Image (spheres, rainbow, N blue to C red):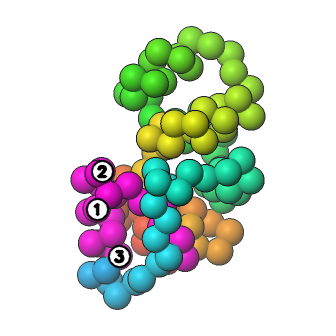
Amino acid sequence: MKYYHNNRCRKSREGLIFLEERNIKPQIVEYINSKLNEAEIELILKHLNYKAIELIRKNESVYKDNIKGKNLSEIELIKWMIKEPKLMERPILVNGNKAVIGRPSEKFLEII
């Protein structure tokens, strides 16, 4: 299992605690610091069964200033998430070929 984590995000920290309380210890990927590549984001999208726009946080100023209202392709949106990783929804738990965004953390139970 992989846990895409942003330590500055309260929901991401809560999700990690939720997993730890259940003795689940996924590999933690601090994607803000490590910056994901195109293939990694495409794989996350595939496991979530999402389009790129569904993984983007719409309240971020980067979204409002650069993406909102534009007709960007999947690859253009993925490139924005690579450039500005805080755009990605979080936390994300990947288990095998399934993934879920842990909002709320109980959603993790769907794939554990």
Question: Which residue in the structure is indicated by mark 3?
Answer: 19
Regarding residue 110, the answer to whether it shows in the image is no
| Secondary structure found at label 2 | loop
C-alpha span from label 2 to label 3? 16 Å
**Mark 1 and mark 2 in contact (Cβ < 8 Å)?**
yes
Identify residue type, mark 2: Cys
Q: CA distance from mark 1 to mark 3?
A: 10 Å
Q: Are marks 2 and 3 in contact (CB under 8 Å)?
A: no
Camera-side mark, 1 or 3: 1
| Amino acid at dot 3 | Leu
Q: Report whether 44 appears left or right of 11.
A: right
- Location of residue 48 with respect to 66 vertically, above or below: below
Q: Nearer the viewer, residue 111 or 66?
A: 66
Look at the image and tell me whether residue 58 can be seen: yes
Label 2: how many residues lie within 10 Å, few (<14), some (14-19) or many (20+)? few
Nearer the N terminus, badge 1 or badge 3?
1
Residue, disc 2: 9
Q: Which residue is mark 1?
A: 13
**The N terminus lies in quadrant:** bottom right
Span highlighted in magenta in the image: 1-19
**In the image, is residue 105 part of the stretch drawn in magenta?**
no
Work out whether mark 2 precedes mark 3 in sequence or the reverse, and give the earlier one: 2
Q: Quadrant of residue 17?
A: bottom left
Q: Position of residue 48 (x, y in %)?
A: 61, 54
| Mark in front: 2 vs 3 | 2
The mark tally for this picture is 3
Say what amino acid the circle numbered 1 marks: Arg
